[in-house]
Amino acid sequence: METNVAWIDDLHLLTLKTNKITSLKDNKSPVIYWEEEDKYFPITIENVTNTSAVNFSFSDILPMGETLTLIWGDESFPVYPRGIVRTPWFDETYAAFEEVLGVYCNNDVTYFSIWTPLATSVILYLNNMSKKLNRQSNGVWTCQVEGNCHGFAYEYEITAYGKTMRVNDPYAKSMLANSEKGVVIDFSKTDPIIVKRPSIHYLQDAIIYELHVRDATIHSDSGIVNKGKFLGLSELESTTINGYSTGLSYIKELGCTHIQLLPINDYARVNELEPKDQYNWGYDPLYFQSLEGSYSILPHDPVSRINECKKMINTIHQEGLSVILDVVFNHVFIMEQSPLEKLVPGYYFRYHDDGSLSNGTGVGNELATERKMVRKLILDSIDLFLTEYQVSGFRFDLMGAIDIDTMNDIVTRCEKEPSHILLLGEGWELETSLPPEKKATSRNSHNLKGICFFNDYFRDSIKGNVFNVEDTGFVNGGGRFIERLPELVTGTILEEIGQPFVSNVEQTINYVECHDNHTLWDRLILTNGHEDDEIRKKMHLVATGMVLLSQGVPFIHAGQEWFRTKQGIENSYISGDAINQLDWKKREKEEANIHFIRNLIAIRRQYEVFRLRTKEEIRRRFHLLNVPKPIFGYILFGNDEDFSIYINPTNENYKLQLPSPGLWKIIATNDFNRANHDVDGEFFLISPYELIVLIKSR
């Protein structure tokens, strides 16, 4: 606590820390003086907590954003808000939920608006001019400038807490390189997205492909000109030197419906003018509504990055795919340097009752999403990317640090769109100061009906617990956890089988690999290093195949289908291109294995029985088959055909009996040596580490 400052910690509580208490204790009548109004507020000494701290109480409501002074005898101390900003009173009094914040242009006038209720002065610096802003009662400061200022750089000079500083607008829609200043953007002067976002009928129809913009195209043999850029993902018909598809064309061929991009908003750790010198996944957010400049071919041009991103999204739509954005609304890179903290100190972040920062995110701070103006920033950011960038979904990083009400408000906003907006997140339980019943976690999925959750139970059952590198699961442990497989393939929602993970089948995101933790291939090397590559590849295909064949929403990490490796690095968030890039040469070598995954995706998309919508449908159409353990088998009853799926997690052959005699056609298997694609009769042999799908017409 800063010495010789009096802090407003509650509506009627003042805390002073000073080394002058001994000389002040005989002065019985301290007051607070409001300079602008020449007004005095009486206060009462409540208790002296130690030799250097004293608490006062008072009955008046002190004005915020004014010059206040505690006068006690011959001494005076500045009075500043502190804990008061985290009270319900402050949140209600200064809520400006309906205000349009940021900058917008209307005809030949540009309007500026910023929320900073504790400031005593705000000055706009726009190119070579300055202008004072006017304060409203809700703490919003506004001004207007004649002319359309599209492309002009701007920042604010804020005076608060007795200090004057320059601050960027957290609502800036674009930035100068390396976030030097905000830039005025008139979106009517940017390129429009012409091709509408593709539509899906139900969330289960989605197949998500997680991708990092830079990773996708930076490889030397990607065949892409604008490597590592937004524009790189808008280049079509790119190939390796040997003619194998790469980039967006490859993803379209694979058959996924949604590309999920790791964060593309402005983030730290990468010099936007020399991006090859650093690497970052994007989970160090700086500004939520401005795009990352290192993905632009013209990072010094704040309009170009917008147009390039829009061209990328437009081209992705043109190819029949949708875009999901990974968004990080749980923390900022460095709290003390964030404009949020500078504009309203102590408000935007979550604290414990003892005044210490809550740190459930593990990075030093958490956004207090439950507060009205934090929620507004999030909702306004969601609205921007829905309207201007036409995205089709959002993936919420560390969603368990976000409150339920905010997530449901996001659902309400997204329901206004003409097509399904996919909302998914990490519903982990985090050690935050937010009460458990208010967290957007998977255990609270019944209160989050429009939200999907990453299913870590599915992930860990298939390959072992990610926090124990030696742990194994079904595919790499000889059938371990086979008792869980009925739960997994039915969407982890049937109470009669096990403890439901979520409330509805469309809420489960099934996956075995993502950008976090070891890739599945690197994991298999750790757990099954004694096996040869071909066996590990079969295990790998089984795991990915189970993701695609299970009820719920399947999720694939880019390159997973060709055994992506990060050379054993578990957390590659700053590891550089050599580790993180998609290796398109490896893609060439694994075409047969990629074809197996491509075929499973096509099967899922063709047959609705793999995308059932309700518990009742799953109960009616799913049936376990009687097979010797640790083989797992089940049947799905379609309207006109039946599907038998068998998985062998061992190195042995097994003779199996089909559910009924007749002609069963093999439509998918990772045993590429099978010459005969039909089984005519009642018995067949399943080979080691085989996943096989058979179909029989009625």
Image (spheres, rainbow, N blue to C red):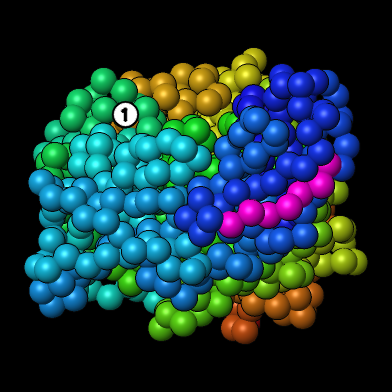
Front position in the image: 154 or 523: 154
Amino acid under label 1? Answer: Val
Q: Whole-percent x and y of residue 176? A: 20, 42
The reply to whether residue 137 is in sight is yes
Q: Quadrant of residue 187?
A: bottom left
Residue on which disc 1 sits:
270
Magenta residue span: 39-45
Q: Residue at x 21, y 48 (%)?
A: 125
Helix, strand or loop for the magenta stretch, by majority:
strand
Q: Residue at x 14, y 33 (%)?
A: 241
- Residue 696 lies within the magenta run: no
- Residue 41 lies within the magenta run: yes
Front position in the image: 269 or 441: 269
Q: Whole-percent x and y of residue 112? A: 28, 63
Q: Quadrant of residue 625?
A: bottom right
Q: Is residue 180 left or right of residue 40?
A: left
Secondary structure found at label 1: loop
